[in-house]
Image (tube, rainbow, N blue to C red):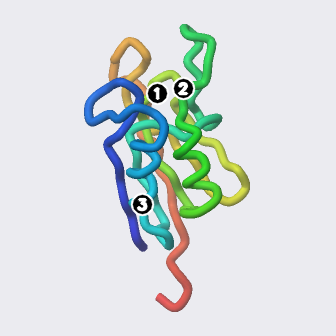
Amino acid sequence: MLCTRTPWFNGWGFNLPRGQSLLDKWNLIPEGIDILMTHGPPLGFRDWVPKELQRVGCVELLNTVQRRVRPKLHVFGGIHEGYGIMTDGYTTYINASTCTVSFQPTNPPIIFDLPNPQGS
């Protein structure tokens, strides 16, 4: 099982502006991985911020995940309000933030199982 992670996201530590400079980083994510870990979510997956009345996920990350990398699991947690699980039918997206929007560590851990690769 292969896994990779990234630290870039939306105006907080280790960030890059949206657009080409960020896409260049997403393009470094290798194909053929099973688990992808990023700080922030792709656009439309557990990325809703009610206070701002908008989705804040990254469209470049969404395209990278759905069109090229296609991991079985994409785990992130930067948007505390988005805690929970979604799927697009291929990739399962987990916002595993342990903290609430007020930075209280009260969200329970999310436990998941992936099947063993064939032939193992």
Q: Is residue 83 above or below residue 69?
A: above
Which residue is identified by label 3? 29
Give me the residue at 52% from left, 46% from top.
61
Q: Amino acid at mark 3?
A: Ile
Residue 48 image-quadrant placement:
top right
Q: Are marks 2 and 1 in contact (CB under 8 Å)?
A: yes
Residue 97 image-quadrant placement:
top left
User: What numbered label is drawn on residue 7?
Assistant: none
Quick one: SS at disc 2? loop
Q: Is residue 61 above or below residue 90?
A: above
User: What numbered label is drawn on residue 56?
Assistant: 2
Which residue is identified by label 1? 79
Q: Amino acid at mark 1?
A: Ile
Q: Is residue 35 above or below residue 85?
A: below
> Marks 2 and 1: which is nearer the front?
2
Give me the residue at 63% from left, 55% from top.
66
Residue 85 position, x and y percent, is 59, 41
Residue 106 position, x and y percent, is 38, 23
Q: Amino acid at mark 2?
A: Val
